[in-house]
Image (cartoon, rainbow, N blue to C red):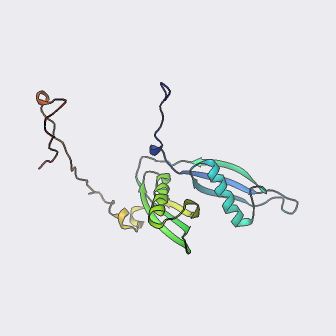
Amino acid sequence: MVKGKFSIDPSLEAKMHQYQIVGRAAPTNKNPTPKIYRMRIFARNVVLAKSRFWYFMKRLNKAKKSGGELLSVNELHDTSPTKVKNYGIWLRYDSRTNTHNMYKEYRNVNINGAVGQLYQEMAGRHRADPGSIQIIHATTVPDDKCRRDHVLEMHGDRLKFPVVRKIPHAVKKLRTTFKAKRASTFVR
């Protein structure tokens, strides 16, 4: 490590990013003004986001990367990344046997974190490959519209978390660096 420089732990960074990509098929003599498409794509980086955009464009109107053009690529950021919100995500994924539609809910501080949770859960519970997951729509959901129990249990003003391992402080003159017996962390 270089002196004076700090390296960021990759586990603390947001895994997924949200990009807005605008593109179209290239203008031709037959169609001088092709229809412009705008998509919100979730990907780990810009290169994968562009690739995903052309994957969907090929299905929508048979426009490939070689016969198309990108008009803009922007990364989208949340307006309030410090407030916990409920996110609803509609998706389609290919399993080993069939294609399935799903709706899932997550609580997170931003939409990128919620989509990261989605990919982790889909890999763990359904063995879904990230390439086989298509996010149809992702949005914030108000508290009264939430459906899933693991999200609903976090609602309410009277939500409290117990302090399980509260360690009492010893008097200053009795504190030492090393102790002969382990400290008791159980408080009645």
Q: Is residue 21 left or right of residue 146?
A: right
Query: Quarter of the image holding residue 121?
Result: bottom left
Image coordinates of residue 101 in percent, x first then y, are: 53, 71
Image coordinates of residue 68 in percent, x first then y, are: 76, 56
Residue occupying image coordinates x 48% and y 25%: 4
Image coordinates of residue 2 in percent, x first then y, are: 50, 27
Residue situated in front as seen by the camera: 77 or 175: 175
Question: As drawn, which residue projects farthest toward the right?
Answer: 29
Residue occupying image coordinates x 56% and y 75%: 98
Question: As drawn, which residue projects farthest toward the bottom?
Answer: 97
Residue situated in front as seen by the camera: 134 or 127: 127
Residue situated in front as seen by the camera: 88 or 126: 126
Q: Is residue 4 left or right of residue 155?
A: right
Residue 161 in the image: above or below residue 11: below
Number of residue marks = 0
Q: Is residue 119 visible?
A: yes
Image coordinates of residue 100 in percent, x first then y, are: 54, 72
Q: Is residue 141 visible?
A: no
Question: As drawn, which residue projects farthest toward the top?
Answer: 3
Residue occupying image coordinates x 45% and y 57%: 117
Q: Is residue 52 left or right of residue 3?
A: right
